[in-house]
Amino acid sequence: MKQTCSITGKQFEITDADIKFYQRMWVPLPTLCPQERQRRRLSWRNERSLYKRTCDATGTSIISIYHPDSDYKVYESKSWWSDNWDPMDYGRDFDFSRGFFDQYNDLYKEVPKINLIASNNENSQYVNLETDSKNCYMNIWGHFNQDCMYNTHVFNSEDCLDSYWLDSSKHCYSSYKCFDSFKLFYSHWCYGCRDVFHSSFCRNLKNCFGCVHLENKAYHILNTEYTPDEYHQKIESILSNKEAFKDFLSDLKALQDLHASKNNTTQNSEEVSGDDIKDSKNAYEVYGSEDIQDAKYIYVWMWIKDSYDCTRLGFQISRCYEVMAGTNLDNVLFSCYVLDGIHDTYYSTNCHSSHHLFGCTWFRNKSYCILNKQYTKEEYEELVPKIIEKMIDDWEWWEFFPSNMSPFGYNETVANEYFPLTKKEALEKWFNWSDYEAPFPKVEKIIPASKLPSNIKEIPDDILNWAIECEITKKPFRIIKPELEFYRKHNLPIPKRHPDRRHLDRMNSFPTNTWKS
């Protein structure tokens, strides 16, 4: 059957299997198309907008995903996890004369929030969604990394920069979805490669340049074999001449187009649709995920059964619907950042190791609570159906949290990466918008990117005291010392684009983003 999206006015398909799932979950048919449901969830996720502000518990300076002018209390991690405060102190009775979302919004605004989602990191102040890492800067959504900068979704890696989705790799730059590799540059979908540049869909290569769908080879350029001496001579001639490099890129594009039919990122799966799927069955509109069964509209998750509309990293879940970020979940609906064994939970945010929650926020190790207030099991089971009935009457039940309740401006969130809007467009669609501009550090001078020498050997140490004006956005950015050392060590030019712009450039080129259209 066809359903009309209440935002776009466009029709979207609802299959018989979809209807059976919604009936099992005791929810009506969605009123928004899959893309708008995804946009709404992502409008609650700020990954990369980090700010300096003061901890409201200790008065110390901290880095936070909440800017200093926001209305929220923000605690640094140690204070938030301490026993010096209790989120249940903010609990309140459900008021049947008011709508649920209105009451939840009041609660959500009052309960202190943790500054970052990060733990067990060393010398890594500017990271988010990162754990167990050392000497990292602007690393987002990664674990067990060292000396890594400006990466997203990178694990067990060292000395990597400006990359997305690496695992067990070292000395990599500007690469995507690569594993067990060493000195890999400007490449994607590569496994077990060493000293490889501008290559894609390759395995176990060594000293290769511009190769596509090649395995177990060495000293190849554009899939053609050379002797070691010939290889190095030809590489030098390509890199030392702009026209030669331009011709190389043209030849590489032709080679990629020739092998494009082999670019199948679905592995060991049956009855699936989407992209970058592994070990899955009966999984539809799934992207960047593995071990998915009987599920639909899943974006970057693992080990999922019987769930729909789950977004942006999670694993080991079942019977979930409209969830953004979670781990080890069962029977969780309309919730975000629910972690570590949450089950039988509805409309809750940022909760850990809890169960039977309804409309709770920033909880840990709790059960049978509504709006952060404790109930007995019997009281909870009697009250929740009445609240749901009230929400159905108010047309609130069955929808994720409204975007205008998000603590972030649309322009601060991942939603804007996939579904970019102007401020006017965002406000017209009832999203929030942040006008906060962090003060830029004092610098000796600002240099346009076009004035930067292309040869890293010509870059002076003084660049650490300058700002560079992005060639696209004109937004100034700085180079930090470990970053400069990386470029020098690997003979790479100083980037001419702001880190945020480089991130967007990568995101716009990734096949796992095809679901956004």
Image: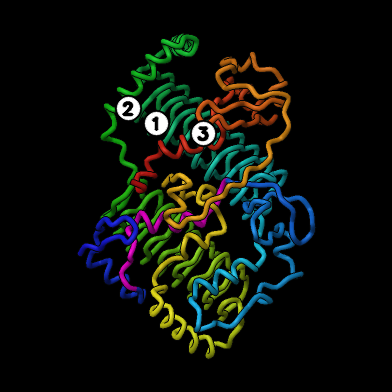
Q: Nearer the viewer, residue 509 or 271?
A: 509
**Residue 461, above or below 84:** above
Q: Which residue is mark 3?
A: 502
The reply to whether callout 1 and callout 2 are in contact (CB within 8 Å) is yes
Q: Kindly identify the amino acid type of the residue bearing the numbered disc 2.
A: Gln
The answer to which of marks 3 and 2 sits earlier in the sequence is 2
User: Which colour scheme appears in the figure?
Assistant: rainbow
Q: Which residue is mark 2?
A: 256
Q: Is residue 306 left or right of residue 66?
A: left
Q: Does residue 302 appear in the picture of this structure?
A: no
Q: Is residue 471 left or right of residue 255?
A: right
In the image as oriented, which residue stretches furthest toward the right?
A: 59
Quarter of the rendering containing residue 441: top right
Q: Nearer the viewer, residue 268 or 106?
A: 106
Q: Magenta region: which residues?
A: 28-48
Q: Kindly identify the amino acid type of the residue bearing the numbered disc 3.
A: Arg
Q: Is residue 328 left or right of residue 270?
A: right
Disc on res. 200: 1
Secondary element at image label 3: helix
Q: Residue at x 56, y 40 (%)?
A: 151
Q: Nearer the viewer, residue 432 or 160?
A: 432
